[in-house]
Amino acid sequence: MELGLSKNYSDCNLVEWTLYEQVAVAAMDCQSLDVAKDCVNVLQKKFPESKRVGRLEAMLLEAKGSWGEAEKAYSSLLEDNPFDQVVHKRRVALVKAQGNLSGAIDLLNKYLETFMADHDAWRELAEIYISLQMYKQAAFCYEELILSQPTVPLYHLAYADVLYTLGGIENLLTAKKYYSITIDLTGGKNTRALFGICLCTSAITQLSKGRNKEDKDSPDLQSLASAALEKEYKRRASDKLSALTLAFKTLKVSS
Amino acid sequence: MAEDLVLDTAIRDWVLIPLTVVMILIGVLRYFVSKLMRSQQNPDAKVVREGQVVIRARNLRAGANFIPAKSFRARRAYFSNEENGLLHVPKGQGQNPQAQMFSDPNMAMDMMKKNLSMIIPQTLTFAWVNFFFSGFVAAKIPFPLTQRFRSMLQNGIDLSTVDVSYVSSRSWYFLNLFGLRGLFSLILGEENAMDDTQRMMQMSGFGMDPTKNLSAEKDGLDIIQHEWALPKFEQRAEAALKKLIS
């Protein structure tokens, strides 16, 4: 593998070294540590002083599972350059890999205090919060994501999910609106958003039953969503159609 | 009279071409010297943070209508409240860059280095050209030009009777100084070529005040009217679904 690399690309040096780096990272991703080690060694020989190679070495340690050494390597890298965003994120990943989710949250929060425009970090934080069932915090993170990229339907969808999970009539109404925007942005192709509409509507009707409040401003939307779902199921998975109608029945949803 | 002012070929061989070659060599040399002298400067934590704050506030301003009113108000308060909002700049804290420069010797040092690598070779070559080649008519442009170009093309020759299309050696030096950028970008790669004109512009743009950015962003945030865009998306979703079903 490596020999092939150096032969093919020996004429264009810059590409070759970048390739070594990429191959090293990819090898770590699929746990072929020997390949990764070879790549890192070659790079180390070529650029003995480089911070970037130092980062790769630390990542190799991390891939091996020697957390303590990796942590030490990352901290020394951060001492040299406290603004290396990749190293900061690696540290978060390291802590998270050890199963210390609250530690990861602390680190991420500290990181976001400085680099608050980094939406990938916000996303990671949101996911960690969700896995710890801290939905209010997760909702905040998703709001931040929506602000930074208002046209990505996935963030609207995730935000709606969180709001639905939080519950309460107000959150449910808001969640329904965010499912709607997801439908609008995806052209109705997102099954999860369609189900979300149905679930929200049924939960809202249940909650507002006693109060008789005319909040059902668009009963249309829900029937449209369930119709769209039915059509989609007929086309793609007609054997599961019965399950769908059963689900609708339990939700007391007309279609 | 100027019609047949014959230029000696020796002038071409000993003035025009050497001058150009020397200018190119100096440009390349200066590139490498400045590369050596360039110090890896760590950005200031405060500056990085302020930049990120501005980006986030800008996002908030742009996407305000996509989040619920309560969330928007909380964020606006976080950014622009008068006590400890992120965008709030306490009075008198906005240092001017001059003072900042003196307080931070590294910054002054960097400026000096940049300046030195720019000014020293320039004065040296200019002195060299002046000393050896002053008064030469070095080249002739193959088309006629108006009188206004005289100061540009015949710097150093005080004869008003010479045709404007002749170029004096000193002017040739200036033309090279400002015109070799394209060549450098070919030799040194696109982004490495920094010519003097660009550098001068950078110098003049140096006196930017980052805190101004913050307070401008704060003002922008303060005047926003929050109008939740989501309610009308229910209708739009209905329309999309109707289209899908039919």
Image: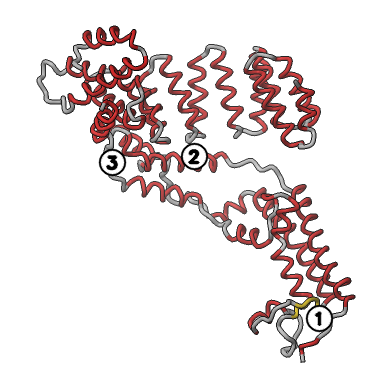
Q: Nearer the viewer, residue A152 or A105?
A: A152
Residue in the foreground of this view, choosing between B92 and A188: A188
Is the C-beta separation of discs 3 and 2 under 8 Å? no
Spatial distance from mark 1 to mark 2, Cα to Cα?
56 Å
Mark 1: few, some, or many residues within 10 Å (few <14, many ≥20)?
A: some
**Residue B52: numbered disc:** 2
Residue B226 is marked as 3
* Left or right: B36 as drawn, with respect to A31: right
Q: What's the image's color scheme?
A: secondary structure
Q: Residues within 10 Å of mark 2 (few under 14, many from 20)?
A: some
Q: Position of residue A208 (x, y in %)?
A: 15, 18
Q: Chain of mark 1?
A: B
Q: Judge if badges 3 and 2 mark residues of a common chain.
A: yes
- Secondary structure type for disc 3: loop
> Which residue lies at the image location 78% right of the left edge and 55% below the top edge?
B28
Residues beneath discs 1 and 2 located on the same chain: yes
Tell me the chain of label 2: B
Sequence-wise first label, 1 or 2: 2
The residue that disc 1 covers is: B135
Q: Residue at x 36, y 23 (%)?
A: A190
Q: Residue at x 66, y 81 (%)?
A: B145
As helix, strand or loop, the secondary structure at mark 2 comes to: helix
Distance between the alpha carbons at the discs numbered 3 and 2 = 23 Å
Asked which secondary structure carries label 1, the reply is: loop
Amino acid residing under circle 3 = His
The kind of residue on which mark 2 rests is Gln
Q: Quadrant of residue B144?
A: bottom right
